[in-house]
Amino acid sequence: MFNHTLMKKTTKVFVTIVCLTFMLLPTSIIQAQSIHKSNFAPYWQLHLTAGTSLFFGDIKQNKFWPVSKDKNEWRMGTAVEISRQLSPVFGIGAQALYGQLSGTRRDANQYFQDNYIEFTLNASLSLTNLFWKYDMDRRFNVYLLAGLGLTNYNTTVYDLSSGAVIARLGNGYGSSFGGRTLEGILTGGIGYSYQLNKHWGVHFETTNHIMNSDMMDNHPGGKFKYDFYNYTSVGLSFKFGRGRKVLGGRFVETASPRSQAGEARPGSEQKENAKTRHSVEKPQAVELQPVQPKVSSQKQEVTKPKPIPVKKLSPDIQAQKSIIKTPPPPVQPRLEYRVQISAHFGRALSTDYLTKRYHITHFTIREDMHKGYYIYTIGAFDTYEQARTARDTLRQVNGVADAFVVAFKNGYRLSKLPK
């Protein structure tokens, strides 16, 4: 039976934790995303775990450590969870847990056995990304867990000496499915994860599950005001929804003609323009020398009554003359858009590593420096739309979930995109 007053209190506590998390979230995101606001892309994860399930309540021989002889208190559990990482710091998930519990109390001549099915909604808070700058290449993560849910259990209490059944909870007489007893729970704990590659990871978690009553062992009013159990587990996690198909950087070859021929270095257009002007100016000085007789013709107009007609210049010579008189237009700064795939502070990354990780052709990756970071980009696009198309391809096809568009002017990365 529910203790509604306690449920209201536990719900308020959980809502307070979530609200505090959301208050910390904007600051943590700004601190974590040191390169660009889109340096993180949300993703899904599937978790499978297994571990120990231990009871803490009134029917228990020792206060903390479980007994392993004469009615063993060690039990196991297994769980599946799907979660969504919304930011480098904050994530949410839904978990289904099945486990067994047992407790022995020799001075009371009792022991009990229990099996439960639990459903919870959880929130996770990454301590690693909260207190250190977010790094998409970081493999480890320490995080806090908090959740709220329901547990559905069957409990049978026995006489320790004779083995006779003393009491039953649930077992066809409860209010939940299958006649189980239904209770509200509040969960909290800590976890550690290590990412093996871009999809697979391992993690270790320990969480306490506080019951809404003191009735799980059918022994109310004892030392424990509320029964609770601990689930300590190890498991595998799988990231998905990020595009697993590999095309080896084909988009770079088709996105822009500049990428196929090898990207031109900033300033190369200036050199080509200078060469072009030099090649035009040289023949101009030679071909315009015959125009000098124009001075003598003007003198003849003064001495002779009949002026000598001046021969008109050819269109080619007139065009060359206008080129000499008109100053060349100023050279515009070179602006291009690229797609940034990685960054590392103070130490360069191997392009071979990036090539293998993202399945991108080696020669397409370019390395530059920006505010102490080694940044790695792909492509050289004239418009933001072209770069955005390449970015989407990198995210969906090559699995570079953190790819984003950046702008370069004269070979230097701008802090923000031009308007």
Image: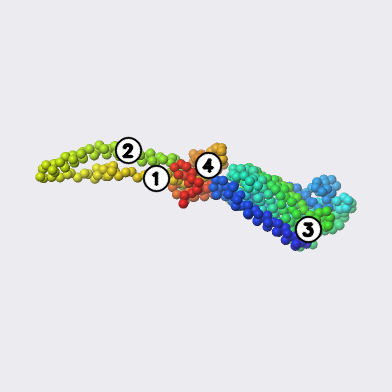
**Label 4 amino acid?**
Lys
Q: Which mark is residue 213?
A: 3
Which residue is at the front of the view, 95 or 380?
380
Q: Which mark is residue 278?
A: 2
Circle 1: element type: loop
**Label 1 amino acid?**
Gln
Which residue is at the front of the view, 314 or 299?
299
Q: Nearer the viewer, mark 1 or mark 2?
A: 1
Q: Position of residue 377 (x, y in %)?
A: 50, 43
N-term-proximal mark, 4 vs 3 = 3
**Residue at horizontal 22 percent and vertical 44 percent from the top:** 314
- Distance from Cα at disc 2 to Cα at disc 3: 91 Å
Q: Is residue 351 above or below residue 406?
A: above
Label 4 environment density (alpha carbons within 10 Å; few <14, some 14–19, many ≥20): few
- Distance from Cα at disc 4 to Cα at disc 2: 39 Å
**Label 3 amino acid?**
Ser
Q: Position of residue 381 (x, y in %)?
A: 45, 46
Q: Which residue is mark 1?
A: 332
For residue 164, side relative to residue 371 (left or right):
right
Q: Position of residue 4 (x, y in %)?
A: 75, 62
Q: Which residue is mark 4?
A: 371
- Distance from Cα at disc 3 to Cα at disc 1: 75 Å
N-term-proximal mark, 2 vs 3 = 3
N-term-proximal mark, 1 vs 2 = 2
